[in-house]
Amino acid sequence: MMRTAHLSRLYLCMFLQKRNNMIPIIPDKIKDSFCSAKWLMATMHFGMGENHSCYHPPIHRWNLEDVKRDPSMLHNTTHKIEQRRQMMNGEKPKECYYCFDMEAINPDVISDRKRFTNEHYAIERRQELIDAPYDKHVNPSYLELSFSNVCNFGCSYCSPGQSSKWENEVRKYGSYPVEDPTVHADKMHDMIPEDDNPYIDAFWKWLPDAYKDLKYLRITGGEPLATRNFMKLLDFVATNHNPNLTLVVNTNLCVPDKNLNMFFEKATTLLNAKTIKGLEVYTSMDTWGPQAEYIRDGLDIARWEQTVRKVSTTFHVPIRVMVTFGLMSIFNFQTFVEKVIQMRSEGIDIMFNCARLVDPKQFDLRILPDYCDKYFTRMNTFIVDNGQIANVERETWQMVYDFWKARHDTMTPEDREWRREQFAKFISEYDKRRNKNFEENFPEITGWI
Ligand code: SF4
């Protein structure tokens, strides 16, 4: 029923674009391989010296000499240009399995590839991308930056590259006894300090040219509110006009008061300056209650809720909650959804969207025992029957639910069992190091690991 509604909307959109001749049609040869995110989206991890487009494929390293010579190669890397060549040749790049696997399960699914390609900023530039040689350097429309891995959280599915709390722990206690290399001491990056980072230097050189084409500038982490360059960027944006730009900040909303106050002060100056279209605050929450605090080590759920309210009353800006839906999210997810609905009823502009947690592999929700089906079915009924769920919430939940239902077709029993073992090993170590107790927090799956 829901999928029919989505498709109707997509077809209506395609019909209108044909009729009005307003939106360029993607040629048949590339319609199943083209993704504008490869041109228009970029995520840069300055602390690791790596980047990717979009944020699903694995990150790849910058070539420092390239970047020093031509800062636009922060985005137009040799690796990325090869992926663009494949897409323009009708090939599906292997690194984009996140989308192509989902489309193989269900060809009608609104994958991120289709979603990103039909974003308004991507439609505006579609003809330009189709007409240009695949190796032409372009400015992104959507740029996501991480200046450093400094963070006061150590979420279970995160890693030293994205969290200094994780980094310090692995340096102190060594690798986790799992195959995931991101939590191995000998695979850890030497993080480039924020104050002496040649890629950040190149970024500040590139920004004045890239800025005019940006529609979304999103700052992530680590925790952006703990970084000096984020504060510098707020000053830059407050003094440089781009009326089409939305500045987005991803924050855990649980930073020390000192950082939070500086953010409130600078964001107030920026909003008063009216140099950009708007500010949006993104934050993560994967379920609710102690289970959420177990998953995201460092989270204080009462403080998070309080700060959501403070952001809303101070700035009246949209607050978007990112749900990274792994195997621990389902049991209390309804309480979280009810909380969002309640906040909306109080006038807070808040919405969530779900992304499937597929990496690290041991957190994949498809490995849950089959008796957990009752939780997914119940949740789906709640979402489908509830008139207060926003479209994006319903659509992204639907992808999670489809993913769960397809578990036996998309994963072998051996793979599921291997992941369950990996999960058990991970959790045993996580509990020990973080002074937590999985069995107490997740009675729904007692005895499963
Ligand atoms: S195809 Fe999917 S994974 Fe690849 S760049 Fe596009 S949205 Fe990202």
Image (cartoon, rainbow, N blue to C red):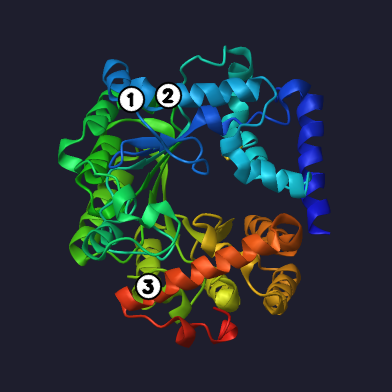
Instruction: Measure the alpha-carbon separation of dots 1 and 3.
Output: 36 Å
Q: In which quarter of the image is ligand 1?
A: top right
Identify the residue position indicated by label 3 in the image: 429
Q: Where is residue 449 in the image (x, y as percent from the top left)?
A: 54, 78
Please tell me whether residue 162 is drawn above or below residue 446 in the rendered image: above
Identify the residue position indicated by label 1 in the image: 63
Q: Nearer the viewer, residue 173 or 256?
A: 173
Q: Nearer the viewer, residue 209 or 42?
A: 42
Instruction: Measure the alpha-carbon separation of dots 1 and 2.
Output: 8 Å
Residue 259's tag is none
The part of the image, by quadrant, that contains residue 49 is top left
Identify the residue position indicated by label 2 in the image: 77
Secondary structure of residue under mark 3: helix
Tell me the mark number nearer the camera, choosing from 1 and 3: 3
Q: What residue type is labelled 3?
A: Glu
Q: Where is residue 296 in the image (x, y as percent from the top left)?
A: 40, 68
Q: Where is residue 382 in the image (x, y as percent from the top left)?
A: 71, 74
Q: Which amino acid does label 1 sit on?
A: Asn
State yes or no: discs 3 and 2 in contact (Cβ < 8 Å). Answer: no
Tell me the mark number nearer the camera, choosing from 1 and 2: 1
- Mark 1 crowd level (few <14, some 14–19, many ≥20, 10 Å Cα): some
The part of the image, by quadrant, that contains residue 294 is bottom left
State yes or no: discs 1 and 2 in contact (Cβ < 8 Å). Answer: yes
Instruction: Measure the alpha-carbon separation of dots 3 and 2.
Output: 38 Å
